[in-house]
Image (cartoon, rainbow, N blue to C red):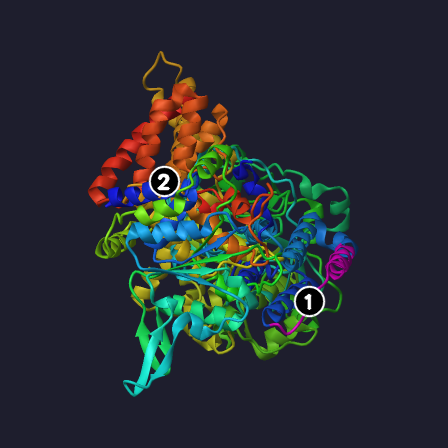
Amino acid sequence: MQNLISNVVQQVGSIVIGKELQIKLAIACLLARGHILIEDLPGMGKTTLAQVLSKTLGLSYQRTQFTSDMLPSDVVGISIFDTNANQFTLHKGPIFNQVVLADEINRASPKTQSALLEAMESSQVSIDGKTYALPNPFLVIATQNPLFHSGTYPLPESQLDRFTMRISLGFPNIEAEKQILGNSHIRQNISDLTECITDEQLIEIQNVVEQVHVSEAILEYVIALCHLSRKQIGSVNPLSPRAGKALLASAKAWAFMENRDHVLPEDVQAVFEAVCEHRLDSSGTISQTNETSIAKQYLDQIDPTSPLNS
Amino acid sequence: MFKRSKKPKITTQVAITYNVWLVIFCQLINVLPLILELKWWMLLIVTACIAWQAGIAKKIIRKPSTIMVAVLSISGCVLLALNGRELGLLSTMIHLITLSYVLKAFEQRNRGDFYQITMLGLFVVVASVIFQQSIYFALAIVFIIIINLTLLMSVFSPTLTISKHLKRSGIIVVQSIPLTVFLFIVFPILSPLWEVPIAKSAKTGLSSSVEVGDIASLALSDELAFRVEFKGAVPVYNDLYWRAVVMENFNGTAWKAGLDSTEFQNRRFKENATYSTSGKLVQYQVIVSPTYRNWLYGLDVARVNQMETPTLKIVHRQDYSLYSLQPLTQNSSYSVTSYVESPMAVNITDHSERKNLALPLNSNPRLTEKAQALRKQYSNNEELINEVLATFTQESYRYTLNPPQLTNNSLDEFYFDTKAGFCEHYASSFTYIMRAAGIPARMVTGYMGGEFNPNAGYFSIYQRDAHAWSEVWLRGKGWVRVDPTAAINPERVERGLSQELLTEQATFSDSAFSLLRLSNIQIINMFRLQLEALDYEWTRWVIGYNSDKQHAFLKDIIQSFKALKHVKWLTVFYWLLGLTSLLIIWWLMRKLSHANKPIDANGIYQLLLIKLQQHGVEKPLNFTPYQLSKKISKDYPELSKEFARFTQLYTSLMYKPLTSNEYQQKFTLLKQSYQILNKQCK
């Protein structure tokens, strides 16, 4: 099973060049049944990543560009009266795909944002009083521009919390950029991609990930990290138990991808920033400077071998 | 950035949690044993402070401010300083420590404060042992200490129940017994730095003067006066007249000990009288309870074996009584040889004769008249004495603990009107008649008889055995004991106070429930005697264990080794002693370190981190075990291999799902790996 996943990583990496860590995180998030928020400047490959992921995983995919005039029905779908059949028929929205790319989510109005986020949380949508189950696996990849950009509605804390991870691709290094610029057939390449994994295999892997062993020491480490955020006063939001759960699930997925049946502190450390930074500092954006993130500071303050005493 | 080094600082700042009511209860019982020794105003302060704390706990009153506490403590100190002269050094110190104990309780901020309060509390409790030394009291004190320990422990693990802590501290105290016994036996006993103050009146017992009614008031006291253990033959019961105070001065109502002012000024009372003794002798050891007076007890004619009595300085007085130069402030023991057939003062001095004939003018005219009439009738002194004693038996005189009240001319009234009295009434009026008839006579007070305890083979003499009798001086015989009580109530001098007499008095007594009252029920009596025996051994071996006894004891042990010669046994003994102490210390250290020893893998890991730190390897706080292993393999290649193995084992133990078998296996390997690394670090 780990082979399947490493194939996926490899294939995505062949298109999204020089971003192994982000790819791994994104896949880990997928294995942990979570959703991803990609925050980055335009043109950094957010969409490409989402496209390649869905293609490689063999999942149905639709991209929706969020704009300020968008309505909830544009996301979930709408019932329209069919004069031929003499009844209302449902025109399913983009959300009924296995991978939903919500591009520039922070440009839509809060009402539309909520429609998407509700679907994310409960894996189902209600249209005209009828409940429709969303496909399985179901992954939302939302992208957003940095908050200082004009015409954005920042996501409130409660909705940020729904995203298991927030990652940023960042500028590629020179080597990678050379490759990107040299390769003029990216679009072509994407359509040539073959799927590495079936739906059933993915679901099975997700189940295996859930079974990864978490020892008490790891639980204590996670709790210690959460507690640290709760002791701080100021602009930092405390980490909720949901955040702890997301952290643990991501760490399990990471451990799985590292070929292990148990979680090590390294796994927690690997996913901690991606999982927690946007929850801790909801007002901020991913720092483009060298300033240390809050999550990194927290990791530095906790001793993984005796977490509750640090 | 190694945070472990900062830890101690943090813990001292942490506020502690404890049961407030347990603290208050502890204070209460810690001060309780001192209740008789503290002044009323001190008790008032103590009560107020404890009540205040209860108020704080109930959230009725606010906590006093620091200034308030300072004011309270300063004013308390001033009060103590003002009363210091009256209290004496020891008592002042005890008051001071009690004051600081109850005031310090308002200042509980952190662990340090709490320790101080507990230590003070233990001091306060133990201070009470200066005043009370019976085994029961000692047991009660041990119990109070257990409760204090319980409080201390409840602070360390507040989640456990009090009963569990109580059990644990009980176990600790029991465990400490061997060490206590060991230290008790071998630790040098130093003389105290303080003088125990002399109580001015308080104690029951014989005093240096007696009025009618004084001894009757003692007759109901079950308090122990002294204990006697005979070496060899025991005299018959009605020869057990324990002489204490000889009273030669009579002022009309009260008899006083023979210390007139000139004698006192000449300090003659401190002189050791010389008198010859001979004939049949009995030997015995006396252990006397503290009386805060100087009188000692002995059978006539007593000679103290000063050699066997190192703690007391005793003089033999001219009147054949024994007198300690220091007041008896604690249980003391002395050894006596009594020459029971030796006559006392065959030749009387003029001074003594004058003194023992002196009577105040017009004090008891009817008795004087009676005596003069008798003198005319009988020229022989002994016949006259017999006649007086016969009067007591033949006429309707009554022996009672509860005689009618007498007005000023007490003896007249007793002899002619009421005709009911206790031993001092008879002894007093008899002595008066003798003096009025021209026979030198004096009052003697002391104790009569005693209770034999077959369990331990000694006599206990209680305050209720207090007695008064007369001595008359007869030419050729010297001072002869005459006990008028024997004439009126022979049972008293044969078996002690009768049950009848006691039941008559029981209704007036406040100690009617005393075990003594029940001494006619055999089982209870046996039980009582067992308890008494226990207390006797306690007094003899524990309270009486002084530096001389210690010396003798250790010497005895060495002596027993001496049977084997040619070896310096003393050296061997001290070596053994030293080794034993070292062994005990080692054992305790092991015990202690065992308690701190890591019981889980993480504990071992943390221990190794400390060792590594000493070796110069610091673990960055956020490093995971593998990251540290990597760092070490880079920076300290000499440790690299073993540490990698150690890390492998540690992570498996900590993070992998293992069966308990696997766990045990790996844990053993981890411990071994730790040992290897520990060596390598050195």
Q: Residue at x 34, y 58 (%)?
A: A33
Q: Tally the marks.
A: 2
C-alpha gap between disc 2 and disc 1: 126 Å
Q: Residue at x 56, y 55 (%)?
A: A281
Q: Is residue B291 above or below residue B500?
A: above
- Quadrant of the frame with the N terminus of chain B: top right
| Residue A219 location (% of width, % of height) | 38, 51
| Residue B94 location (% of width, % of height) | 65, 52
User: Which of the pair B514/A72 is nearer the observer?
Assistant: A72
User: Which of the pair B10/A178 is nearer the observer?
Assistant: A178
Q: What amino acid type should be assigned to the residue bearing mark 1? A: Thr
Does residue A146 appear left or right of residue A4 in this picture? right
Magenta residues? B59-80
- Which residue is tagged 2? A14
User: Which of the pair B379/B331 is nearer the observer?
Assistant: B331
- Which residue is tagged 1? B253
Q: Residue at x 27, y 32 (%)?
A: B669
User: Which of the pair A176/B50 is nearer the observer?
Assistant: A176
Can residue A83 be seen?
Answer: yes
Callout 2: chain: A
**Which secondary structure lies at badge 1?**
loop
Given this view, does label 2 or label 1 mark the residue nearer the observer?
A: 2
Predominant secondary structure in magenta?
Answer: helix
| Residue A258 location (% of width, % of height) | 32, 41
Does residue B423 appear left or right of residue B513 in this picture? right
